[in-house]
Structure formats: C-alpha cells, structure tokens
Image (tube, rainbow, N blue to C red):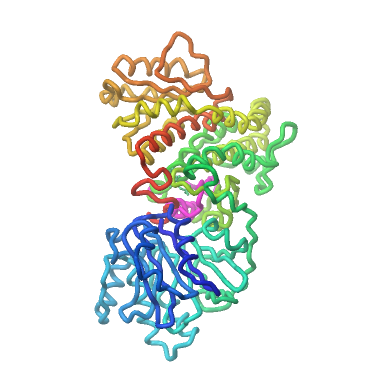
Amino acid sequence: MCGIVGYVGKKKAEPILINGLLRLEYRGYDSAGIATMEKDGIKTIKNKGRVAGLLDIPEISNLEGTMGIAHTRWATHGKPTDINSHPHMDNKKTTAVVHNGIIENYVELKKFLTDNGYEFLSQTDTEVIPNLINYYYEKESGKTENSFLSAMSKAVKDLKGSFAIEVLNQDFKDKMFVIRKDSPLVIGKGDSENYISSDIPAILSFTKDFYLLDDYEFAVLSKDNIDFYDLNLNKVSKSPKNITWDMSAAEKGNFDDFMLKEIYEQPKAIRETIGARVSKDSKIVLDELDFTKEYLESIDRIYIVACGTAMHAGLTVRKILEGFCKIPTEIDIASEFRYRDPLVTKNTLCIFISQSGETADTIAALKLARSKGAKTIAISNVIGSSITNEADYSLYTHAGPEIAVASTKAYTSQITLLAILGMYFAETLGVAKEEVDKLKEEILEIPGKIEDILKDTSKIKTFANRIYQEKNAFYIGRGIDSCVAMEGALKLKEISYIHSESYPAGELKHGSIALIENGVTVVGIMTDPDLTHKTISNLQEVITRGAKTFVVTNQDLENVTFDEVIRVGKVSPYLSPVLSVIPLQLLAYYISKEKGLDVDKPRNLAKSVTVE
Ligand code: F6R
C-alpha cells in the first residue's frame, strides 16, 4: 500500500531510489515519483504509471543529488494522475514529502490551511502534510534543525490516521527527516550512507543492518549519522538489528515471476517454520509461549482474526482447537471484528495472523482485543512488524520475504504454524496424545510431499490452457476442504480476473447452482475420507448441468470421471490444506500467464493493506 524509499550518502541518489522503488512496486503501482536535493534546491519528477515510466522523463538524467526520497503509489485519495503522484510540495516549494498511509482528517486540515492562505493542487490527503509543516515552521523563531523538528512534531500531532513520511526541506541540504505511525518504515544503516524503505527486502542489497521505528518516532538521517527522537523531541537510543536473510530471497532467480518462485519455495518455507518446534519423539517446543494447563482450561473462547488469505489460513486450525482441545473457536475477518463489539473477555485468547504484520484492520482488531483485556498472540512473517509490537506474544512464520502480491508460501507457513500451535495446546492440556503424535509425524513429511506435487505440473498447465478464457469458476469442498476452496477461489480471481466463488459443497444447491451451465468450471477439493463421497455427489450434480470439473484429492476415486484429477499426498485432514492448495495456486498462476497478465502485480491490488 504505497512504497517509500530514501537515500542519503556519497553516491548519486536517483539510481538507488529507482532500484528501491522497483523492488517496492508490489506495494502499489499506480504512479511513482522521486525528489532529490540538488545544488539549486529540491527537484521532483513524478508520473502516472509504473516506476519504469520515470526513466522516460528526460529531466531525470539531470538529477545529480546525493540525497532523495521516492514513492510508488496505490491510490486512495485522488485518481492516479501526474499531479496526485508523490512527492508533494508545500506552496513555497521548500518542503517535499512522500507518504504511505491515510490522513483521515485531511478535509479539516485542508480547510484550516486554505483559511490561512494555502492552495492545493492535488486531490490527495498527503498534500496537507508539507503545507502543515511549512505553516508551523514559519512560526518558529529560527531555521534550525530543532525548529524544523518542532514544526514537524506539531504537524504530526495534528494528523489523524496512519503515516510513514519522508521529508526533505530546502534549509537542510544534507538531512532527511522521517516519522511513522501505523505504517511500516525501516532505516538501513550503511557505510557513509543511510537508507529508508517501507520494507527490508527493497534495500537488502545495500545493507543488512536495520533500525525499526516505533510509532511516533522521528529519525534524522545524514550521510554519517542517524538520530532518533520521540514526539517531544527527546533523543531515543536504538541499536540496529542484523538481518540474516539471504539477498537471493528477494530476487526472482531463474523464475519468471516472484509468485512462481514463492510457490516453489514452499517446502523450504515450511521446513523453516517447523524448525526445531516439532520432532517426532518430544513435545512441541514453542518457547515464545508460557501457557499452562490451568490457563488453557480457563479460556472461554479463541478468536482467530485476520484478513484475506491469512483469514483463510486461520480457518484451518479450528478442527484441532475444537476437535482436540474442546475450546470454542471463532474465525473472524478483522474489518468486521473491530466494529461489532465481539464477546471478548479477560478469559478470551485472540490470535491475529498477518504475513506483513502491517494490515490496518488486523492491527486495529488487536488493539480492540487488548483493550478488552484479552490475551493476544500475533502470527507474522515480518520481524518487528506493528502487529508483533502490539501483541502479548509473537510467533513467526519463517517463510522469507513474500514479494508477489498474491500470497502463497505465507499461507502454507501460517497453516503449518497454526497446526503446531494447536498441537502445543493439546499437549499442554494433555489431550489427544495419539492424534498429536500422528500429526507430528505427518507435519515433518509435508515439505517432501509438496516437492512431489511440484515435480510435474503439466496436467495443471494443460487444464489452465483449456479454461483460461472462461468467465466464471466455482470452488467447492466440505469440512477443511471448504477452507481451501475459499483460498483457491481468491487466488484465481485476484491474479486472473476470472469471477470465482467458493462454497461448502453442500451449499451450492441452495441457490448458486442456478449459475452452473455448459462449460463452467467447478473445482472440487476432496481430502477428508469421511466427506469425499458427499462432495463426489455434489460434483455429479454440476456435471449433469454441463460443468467442467477439476479435482484435487488424496482419496481413491473409483467409478467416477472428472475432467482432470490432481493427486496430492495422503495426510490427515488437519494438515491437508497445505498440500491441496498447491495445485490451486498453480492453476491460478498458469491461467494468469495464459491471459498474459502481470502475475506479481495484479490490477487494483497491493501487498500490505495499511489502510481501512
Ligand atoms: C491474497 C492476499 C491478501 C492478504 C491480506 C492480509 O493473496 O495476500 O488477501 O492475505 O491482505 O495480509 P496480511 O497477511 O499481510 O495481513
């Protein structure tokens, strides 16, 4: 949801900023822009469209400055146009700002500034920021760094909403200013150069030492120095974290797209997520938690709260938590949970899942649960992300950076970690020992079973080629397979733009079957031996109405014919989503490729939804 990058050092800033933007483009790609500090002042270059479009603007070659800020936009306020692109400047052209997030009270601030003689060029919420800073800066007695920080602090105190902001000001030829609240921002420490970025992978090729900013913390960066302040301008001391990610994790390597690479990385991601947490003959190790049997027995219910794919992952663990542990478990969409006064008490455990750890609704839901006294666990893939800073406990998936907008390896790693969490609860409660022991064996075999699926994907590719021009598809399954159906349908619609819906298989005939006609694709997922024959009947119902069927199963299907059957390894239904989703990810991927679409950057979407 918008990417920002900044550089101050000895080198020309422009190529470094463009490189960073290209890596951040998955966060938004409606428009892009950069501002650098030149000898004769701040110069901005921006345009509607992709980052690469900036390179076609002749003036870009005139930028020589060694300090600059840059932005790639996912439009919220105001259409993607040249004027609405960031950076935005104040009326006096002294302050340039790029911003990720939303200023919720920008209408009032715009009115206040307009009443004070300021004019606005764009429809964005962001344009109030440089003008507000300028408004306060002009009221300060001097033009010192302290007075500028004081003006920024006053401006920021007026802002409601979320923001990660980078600022250049004409009076400070070698300093950049940044502050964040509820939007991600990291600072990379180099050798006589420093970096800013919305995420770590974008600047991982330049440094491995990162500072994480807390909400309302400022940083002032120059070539050789980084100072941190709180909102009242007291100095804050921080130490950098060394990130051990390998740079290749953020590169496409031999793959055409990040999504395909990330699909193929799933065995590794799951192995890393399992790590030392599971071994056959010992208890589950989750050192991050200190839950006792008494505590788990006191829980009145568990809420699992997340958005999109992360919510789909949450659905899969209910079977363990309710079936083994007998704890009532509800899975909720964060944007609904936060506004419906959920029944959260001091005895409720709330688990929040977010790959990025920056999803606005999930963070807000977490804050709500805490305010009601619940214990909270964050499950995230990003160390130090906002959700992990807010929660009582944090558990990390170790999927490595996920760059493609459509989530794949994060989803399967989340399911893996949730299953481990469920087993930990069962062991702590002393229940379902036999089942948990079996699950331990099975979970360790999962990466190998994914590798088996990935060995030959030709049947999936051929089916994709058959149906890529279709307009509608339905995904059905029962029990845990209905959760996977939801994820399969989401993958297809988001990257191939084919309308797809998912249903628990028994539900289709209560209305939606009216949409089945000749040629419509129905995807059936069948991994639960107790429910497979039921779903087979539902598939027969659509076949007789002309549907083409694509089946993913680990069951022996006799005397039934489908258009395509993809077999995945046998595993109990508690874990089967990790395998059955793989052919669905690939089906969506190949269809998108057949249609010639940009798989990694589907239209209208962005990774990390930091706005409501
Ligand atoms: C779909 C997808 C989204 C995210 C959702 C939550 O492929 O990636 O549905 O799962 O936006 O994002 P996180 O997990 O970062 O909170």
Q: For the C terminus, which image quadrant?
A: bottom left
Q: For the N terminus, which image quadrant?
A: bottom left
Is 597 magenta? The answer is no
Q: Position of residue 290 (x, y in %)?
A: 67, 47
Q: Where is residue 601 in the image (x, y as percent from the top left)?
A: 40, 48
Instruction: Locate residue 524: give its quadrant.
Output: top left
Query: Which residue is at 45% across, 57% downward?
Result: 22
Instruction: Locate residue 297: give its quadrant.
Output: top right
Q: Is residue 378 visible?
A: no
Q: Can residue 557 be seen in this view?
A: yes
Describe residue 455's horizontal placement relative to residue 584 as left or right.
Answer: right
* Furthest-right residue in this view: 281
Relative to residue 128, is residue 517 depicted above or below?
A: above
Q: Which of 9 and 314 is in front in this view?
A: 9
Query: Which residue is at 40% across, 51% downward?
Result: 606
Instruction: Locate residue 62: give its quadrant.
Output: bottom left
Query: Which residue is at 60% across, 68% downward?
Result: 190
Q: Which contiguous range is marked in magenta?
A: 340-369
Counting every numbered tag in the picture gives 0
Relative to residue 174, is residue 73 depicted above or below?
A: above
Q: Which of 339 and 582 is in front in this view?
A: 582
* Furthest-top residue in this view: 559
Is 347 magenta? The answer is yes
Q: Where is residue 255 in the image (x, y as percent from the top left)?
A: 51, 42
Q: Which of 549 and 477 is in front in this view?
A: 549
Q: Position of residue 547 (x, y in %)?
A: 32, 20
